[in-house]
Image (cartoon, rainbow, N blue to C red):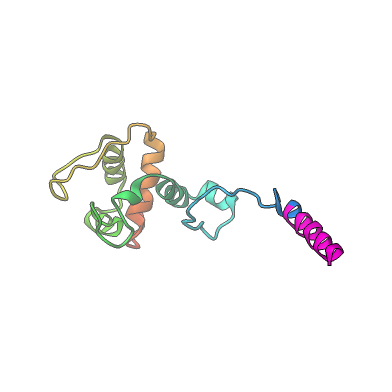
Amino acid sequence: MKKFAQMFLMLACIVVLASCGSKKEEAATEDYGTPDESSEAIAGDVIAQGELLVKASDCKTCHHATNKLIGPSHTDVAKKYDFTQANVTLLAGKIISGGTGVWGEIPMSPHPDISQDDAEKMARYVLSLDGEKEH
């Protein structure tokens, strides 16, 4: 019986030692999905780039693609504004500078760390959500 207990204890130690350090710590990340296109296609597709920028930003704190949260849904923004260069520039400015009054009294916080180029890509993505093409 003593030999059995020693073997059991030894086996338990081996199992414990084998399992120690075998689990890799994984960073907690949310998966917002990725476009189905290859990275080469994304590099040439400004709207796909804008989608990736929106998904990587804090936009989802106040906006949803189809539902109103704190701010309007991105689809509602697309329905309100024609998909023109003038509106891309206008919305990019709102992304960078923030604003209030168009959708109610709750202000949109500014994002001064976003470049004009990236803000325009984000605006193009948002304006594409109602199916309209840029004209």
Q: Residue 6: x, y in percent?
A: 82, 59
User: In the rendered picture of this protein, how many numbered marks are placed on residues?
Assistant: 0
User: Is 50 part of what is drawn in magenta?
Assistant: no
Q: Is residue 135 visible?
A: no
Residue 133 placement: quadrant: bottom left
Residue furthest right in the image: 3
Main SS, magenta residues: helix
Left or right: where 103 falls relative to 85: left
Left or right: where 122 falls relative to 99: right
**Nearest the eye: 49 or 59:** 59
Left or right: where 13 falls relative to 126: right
Q: Residue 48: x, y in percent?
A: 47, 52
**Nearest the eye: 25 or 115:** 25
Q: Residue 91: x, y in percent?
A: 28, 43
Establish if 8 lies above or below 51.
below
**Nearest the eye: 122 or 12:** 12
Placement of the N terminus among the 4 image quadrants = bottom right
Magenta span: 1-16
Q: Residue at x 32, y 53 (%)?
A: 127
Establish if 66 lies above or below 107.
below
Q: Residue at x 65, y 49 (%)?
A: 24
User: Is 4 part of what is drawn in magenta?
Assistant: yes
Q: Residue at x 37, y 35 (%)?
A: 116
Q: Residue at x 61, y 48 (%)?
A: 25
**Nearest the eye: 60 or 128:** 60
Q: Residue 66: x, y in percent?
A: 30, 62
Residue furthest top in the image: 112
Q: Is residue 92 visible?
A: yes
